[in-house]
Amino acid sequence: MINYNVDGDGIATITWNMPDHSMNVLNEKSITAFADAMQKALKDDKVKGVILASGKESFIAGADLNMLLNAPSDPAILMQQFSELQRLFRAFETGGKPWVAAINGTALGGGLEICLACHYRIAAENPKAKIGQPEVKLGLLPGGGGTQRIPRLIGVMAAAPILLEGKELSPADAKNLGLVHEVVPADKLLARAKEWLMTPSKEAPIKPTWGKTANAVDARAVQPWDRPGYKVPGFPGGQVWGPVGVQTFIGGNAMILAKNFAGYPAPKAIMACVYEGLQLPMDTALKVETRYFVSLLLDPVAKSMIRTLFFGLQDANKLARRPKGVPKQEYKKIGVLGAGFMGAGIANVSARAGLQVVLIDRDQAAADKGKAHVQADVEKDAGRGRLTKEKAAEILGRITATPDYAALKGCDLVIEAVFENREVKADVTKKAEAVLAPEAVFASNTSTLPITGLAEASPRPENFIGLHFFSPVEKMPLVEIIMGKKTSQQTQARALDFVQKIRKTPIVVNDSRGFFTSRVVGDYISEGIRMLKEGIPAAMIENAARLAGMPVGPLALNDEVAIDLSWKIIEQTKKDMGDKYRPSGTEEVVKSMVDQGRYGRKAGKGFYDYPAEGKGKSLWPELAKMFPPKPELAFGEGEVKNAAVEEIERRLLYVQAVDTARCLEEGVLTNPQDGDVGSIMGFGFSPRTGGAISLIDQVGVAEFVRRCDAMAKKYGPQFEVPKLLRDMAAKGESFYGAKDKAKAA
């Protein structure tokens, strides 16, 4: 696990190589083994210096998140555990012998923090390597000294994107910032590390400030912050509380509020931790960091985010839902029917993944327009240095734009992305099926129409499946795979292989109207419109949504997906369901907006006005006349208004969560994890909750049922909970409780 070796020159090499892990991680076993090796090196008088290295392709990926997910709930125990980790890193940092980190690959989280405790850092030239502190993305802060060492090395302003946004750096960028000292060819990494240790320091010995020795030590073994007279970079005189410091932290907190409208606890804790810690000696500052870290770890936000955004996302990307025994599909050529915004986006990501793409539309001009969309996107990336001109031309060269369906011959997969109309979809399906091989997969990019019904236009319903992409395709990470009643397991497996090929995250759901994501997004938009009808001011609805953690308000989202599309879906649903159709209470508003030509962003006007010059957007003033606000909400202040905002937040989140639970009960979703991953990655459900199902667990199933019952009486049947939740509440169950306990055991 941890190999220890001392050569004839007195250089010790400690090599991390955990045999039971694909990547090295910090956990109880590895930390204990490292501590033993560290003590050997510090106590052995023959050892002149230490190289910290890795026996794997990566360096250290960070803390074992299973360990964090199942951490004890006693704050005293956690304080002791993580204080010991801080003392461990501090022990070799102040041990009087120089340490050099030989960073051969990715070093994230605790993996970077152990490097920062080393006195010199050399990274290998590795284009795949990532260096950074991603903890904030999981609701945490760096707990191994990252919030204290990084600002002390490079200053607060340079440290902010790394700590507050989880920005990951290449080795070259890390060197430019000052996080690593050198970048060398990979085959020279260990030799250069030893060379640095064997080269005598040009500085005279230094008496460090850590106060553990009366003697001066090798200058190479003393960190900048342990040297007499050290000042924090970027602050005149090193005074964090001086004018520059005040301006920096006031501005920083304002930026956090602007970017962190939903009030995630981690960024605020990081900023406070940095501000407080930089005014203290390092050992005391590390205690401050540990207190903040433990407080975040005990918050249900962090555990929910870890469970969904690490383990859930990892399972999805590794195709955990893929049927066993089906050979992996290697894709070479696919077809896309419809060269509009969605079809062009699908063609774009597929061509970037190395696939030949046939992009078909009604005529050559329409097909060319779709290819032009791809061309504009790759040229933009080339202009920003993300692609070479040659690579951009290669991607574009993989796309054939044509109205000729015969060009689909030889396609392994065809994806239909035409208008949300059953007849139009049936027409293009039949044209494509006429030239496809019997084994080819046909997929529909529909967002609401049941796949089983669409498959009736295909002679091979077992090869027909739904692939629901999200707009814009180039940016949105999720693909919802929809199984029709006759879709085969082999087709499911092959669809998953395609989604993985284009580097998207898949979830698998069963067929129903709206499936999972569109159905729940519809709940969110509908609740916003119902609130508008009730007299809740539009601005209040939109801002409360963002405070709840949603990326955009329900009215803005309806503008993005197109209000006229919402009306078409309503009409198609009425037609398909007949007497079974139940009004949502939004039809009148949607119809009124469509009648006035307010189709959404694409038309330049919807619930918002979109200036032609593209300078921001503003809520349509006429909304206040169409839906007069309640005076107590429009003009009220204090507790009344705060309570109203909290109630709006709850309504917008709970209406999504309760229908996600219905999807589980109805078998549309087959497991809670897909509901959580799909809700966050598909439509931005408040990430701090861990997803729509995790929210129910955070609240407590019984309490969630109680609150929904009260809201159902007050606001309507959209809050009526399914029997699944009532049964769980009666039994005291939760969705993840048993699973988490099993992991802990």
Image (cartoon, rainbow, N blue to C red):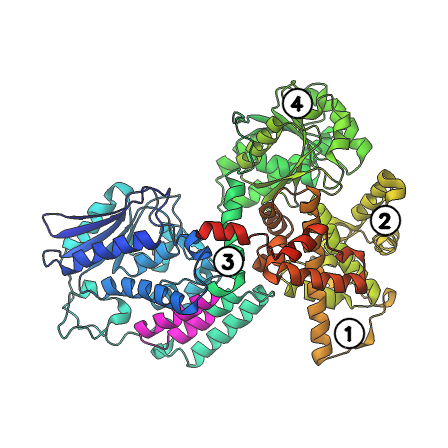
Specify the label residue 611 is tagged with: none
Tell us which disc is closer to us: 3 or 4. Answer: 3
- Image quarter of residue 116: bottom left
Give the residues drawn in magenta, as a range. Answer: 271-296
Q: Secondary structure at mark 4?
A: helix
Tell us which disc is closer to us: 4 or 1. Answer: 1
Q: Please name the residue shown 71% across and 64% down the image.
A: 707
Specify the label residue 408 is tagged with: 4
In the rendered image, residue 495, in percent from the top left (x then y), is placed at 60, 32
- Asked if residue 293 lies in the magenta stretch, the reply is yes
Q: Which residue is denoted by mark 3 in the rendering?
A: 303
Residue type, label 3: Lys
- Asked if residue 744 lies in the magenta stretch, the reply is no
Tell us which disc is closer to us: 2 or 4. Answer: 2
Local packing at callout 1 (Cα closer than 10 Å; few below 14, some 14-19, many 20+) is some
In the rendered image, residue 194, in percent from the top left (x then y), is placed at 18, 50
Q: Is residue 511 left or right of residue 36?
A: right
Q: Is residue 682 visible?
A: yes
- Compute the Cα span from label 3 to label 1: 35 Å
Q: Which residue is denoted by mark 2 in the rendering?
A: 582
Is the stretch drawn in magenta largely helix, strand or loop? helix
Q: Secondary structure at mark 2?
A: loop
